[in-house]
Image: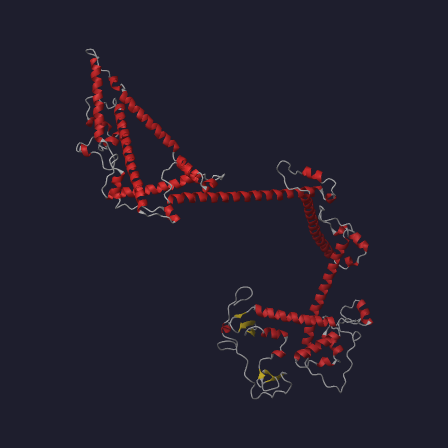
Amino acid sequence: MAGRGRAATLPAWMTAPPGGGAGAPPGPPGPPTAGAPAPTAGAARKWTEHRAADGRLYWNDGSSSSTYSKPKELMTPMERADASTRWKEHRAPDGRVYYYHQDTRETRWSLPDDLRMAREAAALAQSAIAAAAAARSTAPKQTANAAAGADGNATGSPAGTGTDAPSSSKRAPRAPRDPNAPPRVYADKDERKTAFKELLEDFEVTSRHKWDETAKQIKADERFDALKTLGEKKQCFNEYQTQRAKHEREQKRLAEKATRNEFTTMLNERWREWGVEDPSTARHRPTLRDHVDVILASGDVRFTNVKDWRDQDDLFRAFCDDLRVRLREEKAKERAESIDAFKTVLTDIGVNAFTGADPWTWRKVREVLEGDERVKHVDPLVQLEAFEDHARVIDKADSDAKDEERLARLRAERTRRGAFVAMLKSMRSRHTLPLRTPWRHFVKSIEDAPEFLEVSKNVSGSRPRELYDDVREEMESDAAADCAAVETAATAANVTIVPGETTIDALVQAVESTVSLPSLGSAEDDGKNDDSSSSKISRLRVACGDAIAGAVEAGARASRRKERALDDFYYLLRSRRRDVPITPRSTWREIEAALGSERAWIKCAGDTVTSDGKPDDDRDEKSAPGDAKETYLEDARAVFDKYLAKLAKKEAKAREAMEDGEALDETVFDQVDDEDRSMDDRRRRRRSRDDEHSDEGGGGRDRKAARRR
C-alpha cells in the first residue's frame, strides 16, 4: 500500500475485490433485464441512455446491443483518460477513495502515476480547447464596449452597476429562431455542454460573473435549453468559469512576461545611452536608483509598464549580472581572436625556434614587427601572451619529437640486442659456442657478424660482452646441473672420485649407462635440442671433468680447513702455555681438562669434556670425533707431542747454559722460532682475506644484478 506520509494499514474490506467475492472487481453487467424499456431507434452507433428497472443506467446503440458500461463515444475526456489505464477508482465504506489495478490486483490510497499522467494530459487538452474558444471571443468589440473598458470595468459589468452580469449592450444575442424550423438535435451530453459553453463565450462571460445575472441575459438563446436541468447548467457554468479563470491567469502571466521582456530589451538597447557603468570592469555592481532619473526623463514607456519598483530593481540587477557575463565572454573571445591573429603573424615571420645559436626572443620579435600594420591594434600584453603561448607550443612540439626519437632509438636498440642474444643461443644449440670461452677469444670469432656489428652501435643498455656473460651464466647453470647428475650417478654406482687418481674416461665409463642428463632449457626454447649420442658424450665428458675438478677443489678446501684448524690448535697451546701451564711433562688428559672447551680444541679433537668440566675417560680415542663434524684428533695429538718435544728441547738447552743452583727462566719457552713465525704469517693472511670478504659482502652479485637491470 503506497500512500502519502507514513504507510497506512490495509483495511480488511480491501483484501477482497470491490463488491465482494474473490478475484478481480466485477466486470460489465449482462444485458438489460426483461423489464427494461425498449431502446430508442436511431442512427448507427448513436448511443442513447436509458434506465433499467433496478434503477441502473444502460446504453443502447439503436440495435439489440446494450451495455451497462458507458460507451467510449459518450465519455468525457477525464472518463476516457481513466479508461485508458488498468487502474479503477472505487470508494471505501468510510467515504475515502482508493484505486484498484485489474491485472496485478494491487490496491493503494494514493493516485497511481499512470492514472495521474492520463488525467493531466486530458486536462491539458481541455485547457487548449478552452484557450482556443477564448481566443475566438476576442473579436473586435463595439465602440460602447471599448468605452466601457476604458472606464475600468474589467469584469464587463454595465457602468454604474455593482454586478458582474454580462451586458446585453456588449454582444446582442442571436436573432430569435424561426418557429417553423426543426429543433436543434444534440448527439450526446458533451455536444450539449459544448453548445452551452459557446453561448457563454458569445456573451463574453468572465470568471467573475454570477449565475443569476448571467442566466437572465442568456436565457433567450436557444442554446440555453441545451442542458435540461438547472443543476447541469450550473455545473457547466462552473466548469466554464474554472477554465476561463485559468485562461485569464495565463493571459495575465504572459502579459507580465512580455512586459518584463520588453523592460530587459529596453535596458539592452539603451544602457550605454543612460550612462550605466560597464559591469564587467566596475568595482561595484550598478544600481537602478543611480540611473532612475535619467531613465524616467527619456520617457520610455517600457520602463513604466513594470509597475512595482521591486520588480524593476530585480530586473535591473539581473540585467547587470547577465551583461557582466556577456561582456566578459565577448572580451575573452576578442582576446582569443587577437592572440590567434598574432600567432599567425609570428608564423609568417618564421618564429619557430627558441634555442640554438640564434633563438627568437621577445625583443627580437618586437624589432621585426615594429611598424607592422597587422599588429598595431593588438595590445602589447596580448602580444606577449601570444608569444609565450606560441613558444610553449613550439617547445612542446620539439620535446614530443625528441621523446619519439628517443623511444624509436630504444626500440631499435632493443631489437638489436634481441638479435644478438638469438645469435648466441643459436650458436649454443649448434655447439659452436664452447663453454667457458673468454670474451677476448670469443669476440674474434664474431667480429664480422652483422648482429655483433649492429649491437655495437647501441649507446645505452647492455653491451655485447654483458649479453655474452648472461648466456655464459646460463651455460654454467646447465653445466652445474650436468655435474650434479654425474655425481648422483657415481654415488649410485658406488664410484668414489679420488682427486689425482680418477680420470675422465674412467668416470665416463662408470656412469655412462646410468646417468640422466637434464634437458637444456635454452635449446628447448629454440626447438633445437640435440639428443644425439655425440652431443650426450660431449656433455658427459664436460660434466665428468667438472665433477673431478669439484672433487679436487673439495679436497683442497678440506686441506685448507685442516691446516687452519691445526694452526689454531697450535696457537692455542702457545698462547695458553702460562695459564694452564703447559710443560714438557704435561699429558694430553691434563691439557684436555683445561682447554677442552676452547673452540680451537673442539675443531680438532671434538667435544671431549663432560658437563662437569672433566675429560671423558671412557671415550674411545679413535672414535672420539663425532660423525656430524669433521675433526683431526690424530693430527692434533701429533701437533701436541711435537709442541711438548719443542718445549723439552728448549728446556734442555736452557739448563745447559745454567750454573749450579740457578733457577730455570720460564721465558725460554716463549722464544719464537721459524716454524712459529711461518704459522703466524699464515694466520695473519687468512684473517686479512676474511676481512676482505666480509667488507665486499655480496658486492659482485649486486653489481651483476644492477647490470642486468
Q: Is residue 683 above or below residue 323?
A: above
Q: Residue furthest front?
A: 448
Look at 40% across and 41% down and name the residue there: 471
Residue 78 falls in image quadrant: bottom right
| Of 215 and 108, the residue lying toward us | 108
| Of 392 and 300, the residue lying toward us | 392
Q: Is residue 151 above or below residue 46?
A: above
| Of 665 and 128, the residue lying toward us | 665
Whether residue 583 is visible, yes or no, is no
* Quarter placement of the C terminus: top left
Residue 509 falls in image quadrant: top left
Look at 77% across and 82% down and name the residue there: 176
Q: Is residue 629 above or below residue 88?
A: above
Q: Is residue 495 left or right of residue 139?
A: left
| Of 659 and 469, the residue lying toward us | 469
- Residue 342 in the image: state x and y as whole percent: 69, 45
Q: How many marks?
A: 0
- Residue 686 in the image: state x and y as whole percent: 32, 28
Look at 53% across and 64% down and name the residue there: 6
